[in-house]
Image (cartoon, coloured by chain):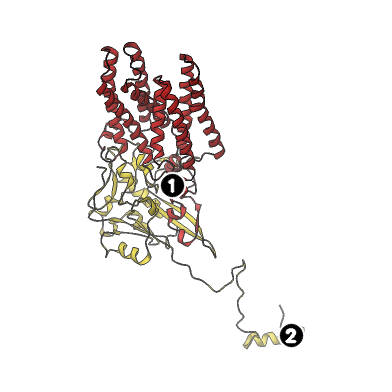
Amino acid sequence: MHPAPSVILFTTLSGLGFGLLFFLGLGYPGSTGWVAFVFFALAYLLAVGGLMASTFHLGHPERALKAFTQWRSSWLSREAWCAVGALVVMGLVGLGRVFFDTHWMALGMIGAVLSVATVLTTSMIYTQLKTVPRWNTPITPMLFLSYSAAGGALLAGQIDWARILLCIVAALQLAWWIAGERALERSGTSLATATGLGPIGTPRAFEPPHTGSNYLTREMVFVVARSHAKLLRLVAVLFAFAIPLVILTMTFNHTLAGVAVISHIAGVLISRWLFFAEAEHVVGLYYGQR
Amino acid sequence: MTLLPEKTDRKLGLVIDLDTCVGCHACVISCKGWNTENYGAPLSDQDPYGADPTGTFLNRVHSYEVQPEEGAAQLIHFPKSCLHCEDAPCVTVCPTGASYKRAEDGIVLVNEADCIGCGLCAWACPYGAREMDSAEKVMKKCTLCVDRIYNENLPEEDREPACVRTCPAGARHFGDFADPSSNVSKLTAERGGMDLMPEQGTKPVNKYLPPRPKDTLEMKVSGAPPLLTPIAEEPKGFLGWLDRTLGQIDGNKTGGR
């Protein structure tokens, strides 16, 4: 799949933002006043910034409100509802924390659940696609949720949680990469089933329909060199998990915490680029690509 | 509405005969011609006469080489357009309700006024049947020429999809798969019509007829064509007389060369 910067930014930033909102909703940290304002402002910048980035890849962003209508069948529509719900509820929670010096616990819990639901629905947009076998696994939502929670814990300054969660994401990320290696083969889809010509022999793409590119090849046929992917995975693990975990074992100060957060975000961005770039869409088979 | 209908009254679709398709791409051109002037936004081209031309098409013809276990490879031309799936994954993912499957005839369509151009339906389609138009920024797909098949302003023989009407080889057939006595149902039953990517669970309506087995000739394929068997060892008649006479003149028994 084409690794579109808008979608990489969206999933990374809004994942972090809703992760932070999750912890704020549960009352960690339970700070109020200006400190709470800074935490909430950061969460909203990330979450809303990510959602804004996601509209950049729309052909007609002016019709985006129509995306709220099909929640009964569409994960993208459900995501829209959950995101707005989480932002509204957590806005009220933030109001109480910043101006009234109180944490409305019940409202905070609802906001936390909606924040998790937003990340879950985002991940389901990718997970539901049978056409992209690498994404079509239960590990995908687990991966998105744990990334969001780990990033949220890091941003919320919940060091103990961050340590545990970073280890969990690292394990899930490795599991996801390993499972992804043979996902296309396991899906059973090949050029033989795509053309139905398997019973008479081994098909090979001989002539494409045209000499140039088209929407399908630009959007869904993106081939990343395996050697590059391996290297990038290593870099992602280093930035997203290794460096933050090492920093978390040191004595806390704000500069180091900032380095840990920035390193983690850089690592997640690389991992998310790979999430798209390495994913093979079965339509590539028709063009002789995997 | 992006929920799929429980069942459709009719199941309109195409049968594509891989045995007869000659790979001329006439269906590609007639499709582009009709659909750029009629239903919905035109099918735009970008840089059509430049170095990197690209454009929106609803029907494209691939060509595949198939190598059997033994014998010569075969070249199969493979037209591909929307299969109007019964379990269309492109419809259910649509967040706006722009994509829908009609309950009356099963045609999968896009309401372009509702399309936000998110591209998720194209991701959900395993067949590459949907393409986002670069100029209009809305999703385009085969409409089964919904503006021809019911169009009473057209002569009756033209009330079928443009690709079917134009195919010079008769490789494309249009009809109702819900009716077991229709031409397409009969063809599918007789020729073993098949689904593309059945494992994707999309239940495509369109069927593909596999190439028929080729004739097998008694001959050794070793590069050179087999030698013809002589029908007479010794020339007879006038040629025989000529051969003998000339042979006597220059002394060669079997005639000159």
Q: Residue at x 57, y 38 (%)?
A: A227
Rendered position, B12 above or below A15: below
Q: Residue at x 46, y 67 (%)?
A: B213
Q: Position of residue B198 (x, y in %)?
A: 38, 54
Q: Position of residue A269 (x, y in %)?
A: 46, 29
Q: Secondary structure at mark 1?
A: loop
Please tell me the numbered disc located at residue B185: none
Q: Mark 2 — residue?
A: B253
Q: Amino acid at mark 1?
A: Val
Numbered disc 1: what chain?
A
The mark lying in front, picked from 1 and 2, is: 1
Using residue B43 as the reference point, say whether residue B245 is left or right of it.
right
**Crowd rating for badge 2 (residues with CA inside 10 Å; few <14, some 14–19, many 20+):** few
Numbered disc 2: what chain?
B
Q: Colour of chain B?
A: yellow
Marks 1 and 2 sit apart, C-alpha to C-alpha, by 71 Å
The image quarter in which residue B234 lies:
bottom right
Q: Secondary structure at mark 2?
A: loop
Q: Position of residue B75 (x, y in %)?
A: 49, 59
Q: Amino acid at mark 2?
A: Lys
Most foreground residue, A111 or A28? A28
Q: Mark 1 — residue?
A: A282
Using residue B37 as the reference point, say whether residue B243 is left or right of it.
right
Q: Quadrant of the N terminus of chain A?
A: top left
Q: Colour of chain A?
A: red
Q: Are marks 1 and 2 in contact (CB under 8 Å)?
A: no
Q: Residue at x 32, y 28 (%)?
A: A115
Instruction: Same chain for labels 1 and 2? Say yes or no.
Output: no
Most foreground residue, A241 or B249? A241
